[in-house]
Each structure stands twice: as C-alpha cells, then as structure tokens.
Amino acid sequence: MTNPPRARRSVDWRAIVGIALSVGFLAYALRDVDPREVMTQLRRADPALFLLAVAAATLPFWIRAWRWRALLAPVAPSTSFRSRFGATTIGFMANNLLPARVGEFLRAWVISRLEPIPVVASLGSLVLERLFDGLTLVAYTFVALAAVGQAGGEVGRSMRTAATGLGIAFAIIAVVLLAMLIWPRRVVAAAEAVVERSLPRAFRRPVVDALETLIGSLGAIRDPGLLARVVAWSAFLWLVGAFSYWLGLLAFGIRVPFTAALFLQSIVSFAVAVPSSPGFFGVFEFAVKKGLVALWAVDPNRAIAFAVGFHLGGFIPVNLIGLFYLWRLGFSWRDVKAGERTVEEQVEAALPSARHGGER
C-alpha cells in the first residue's frame, strides 16, 4: 500500500523540474534559428561521415562494458561481457526514455540479476565509474582549454571555472576514497559520529551501511593492475567520444580542430548533468549551440542542425540495442519502469547482510 505514493514522490517532481528546464533550454537554443535553414543543413550533411560519427558515438557503450569488468572484479572476477553490455545498454536506454534518470539504478539491478553480484556492490562499482568519468573529463577539459587558449572567450572562462571547481571537488572525493582505503574502520567510526549528531535516527544506520558497502567496493583501486586498466579504459572511452563529435562536425561542414570537439564534449557533458527531460533534449542542443557559436562563430542554424542530427544519431542506436537486450535477457518493460523502486527495495534488503559480511 505504501509503494505507489513513494514512487510518485520520488519520480514526479524530478520529472516535472527536468522537463521544465529542458523546455526552457530548448526555447533559448532555438530563439534565433530558422527551422527551414536547419532542415536544409540536415539534408546537406555528408551521410558517410554522419554514419561513421553515429558508429563512433555508439562504441563507448562497448568500452563501458569492458571497463566495468575491472570495476566488478573485486566482487565478481568472471562476469560475462554479454551481461555487462546488456545491463549497460538497458540502463542508458532507460535514461533516454524514462524520467528521473532511473537508468543507473536499473543497470545495477540488471547486472545483479544476471551475475552473482549483490546489488549494493554493483551500485558501488557505478559510483566508482562516475568518479573515473569525472576525473577523466576534467583532465581532458584542461587539455582542450589549453589548446583553445584566448579564443575561448566568455564560454572558455566559464568552462575553466567549472572545470576548476569540478577538479577541486573530485580531488576532495579522491582524498576521501584514499582515506577509506587506508583507514576504513576510522572512516566508518567518524561517519557514525557525524550522522549520530546530524541525522534523524531512522537515517543513521542506512547511511553508515551504505558507506561500509562503498568501502567494500573499492577493491578496483586497491589493485594497481585493475586501477591501470580502469584509467586506460576511461581515457580511451572519452577520446572515442570526442572523435565521434569531430566526425559529426565534419559531416555538417563544421571544420574545427579535434581539440574543439574535445572541448565541445566537455561542455555537453557538464550541461547534461543538470536535471532535464529523458534523453537530455533541450539541454544538449543549448550546450552545443553555446559552444559552437560563441567559440568558433559557427552559424546558429548549422550548429543546431548538427546538435539535432548528432543527438538523434546517438539516441536511436543505444535505445534499439537496449530494447533488444531487454527482450533477449528476459526482462519486461514493467521491470524498467519500476527500476528505481525495485533497486531501493533490493538495497534495503542487501545492506544489513553487506554490513555483516564486511565485519567478518
């Protein structure tokens, strides 16, 4: 009897805010654009280069599945590529089609159904994945900023400020994770002392349990070999992503250096982190237009044509692959729509056993 109200409370408001922000960003992006000219630019795009760009934009999902093996190795060293790739594409498909970005929760739940991995451990691996994504993206942003130089203008200064702030944030997170690795019991004891003073009684134990579970998932960065693999895969993943942007820009006749594509990828990645509609529509187009017009004086119609074409080109394949794996692996659309609530229930059930397991 309590599940439906909780689902409405956790999904509806985030969905409404995300859709409202997306509409606002899209309206701003289209305010000085001629729809007929945009259609003309879409028709004139080089089909061969565009298809190569779409293929390159889809390749990172395979790379993510390979990298995930190293992140899961401490708890499950022999997971199959099929399971990891299926869970990855299902998760990203859910982010594209459902509100509130339930895909991360669903991805953790799917891999725990396909492999003998506790759902909390799979969630911990995804936290680490996002950390490495963020660190890699910040590093590439500074590389791109150095290449852009003074041509960056206001957008470049804004990106430098954002990258610096994110760099500091990720550095703090890295220090905290290092402390978890070196002094795990002290970190848990300190966390218990903090939550004892600052949180209601009902929230204290889940927070500490979650922290203990995260500490248990840090095995990938304790092992130098696994750490090197994760760093290498992360660097390769985002380089391939930038290459797909570059090919897409060339397909629409936008001649810029590769570092411009690397920089544009950073702008878009930072932008889509804000709440938005499923598929990041509006936010994506705004970020692309802002970067191309402000930095390289690209015609707004051509910039929006690239944004729409490249966005749809990357949007459609992963959704089709995700839907295929959803069917092939025996899951239902009901599983997808209930993903977040299902994972919450799984986590609540798994946390006590995870804690006892960590104390053995």
Image (cartoon, rainbow, N blue to C red):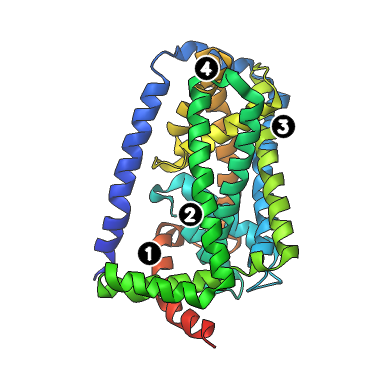
Which one is in front, 286 or 11? 286
Q: Considering only order in the chain, which callout, 4 or 2, is on the residue closer to the N terminus? A: 2
Which residue is found at the position 72% from the left and 45% from the top?
236
- Relative to residue 164, is residue 247 drawn left or right? right
Secondary element at tag 4: helix
Residue 239 sits in quarter: top right
Q: Which residue is mark 4?
A: 293
Q: Which residue is mark 1?
A: 341
Q: CA distance from mark 3 to mark 2?
A: 26 Å
Are discs 1 and 2 less than 8 Å apart at CB?
Answer: no
- Relative to residue 287, is residue 20 drawn left or right? left
Residue 318 against residue 202 in the figure, above or below: above
Are discs 2 and 4 less than 8 Å apart at CB?
Answer: no
Which one is in front, 145 or 48? 145
Q: Is residue 167 visible?
A: yes
Which residue is found at the position 67% from the left and 19% from the top?
256
Q: Position of residue 205 (x, y in %)?
A: 35, 76
Disc 3 marks which amino acid?
Leu
Disc 1 marks which amino acid?
Arg
Disc 4 marks which amino acid?
Val
Q: Position of residue 189 (x, y in %)?
A: 43, 77
Q: Which mark is residue 103?
A: 2
Q: CA distance from mark 4 to mark 1?
A: 42 Å
Q: Which residue is mark 3?
A: 52
Residue 2 sits in quarter: bottom left
Q: Is residue 121 visible?
A: no
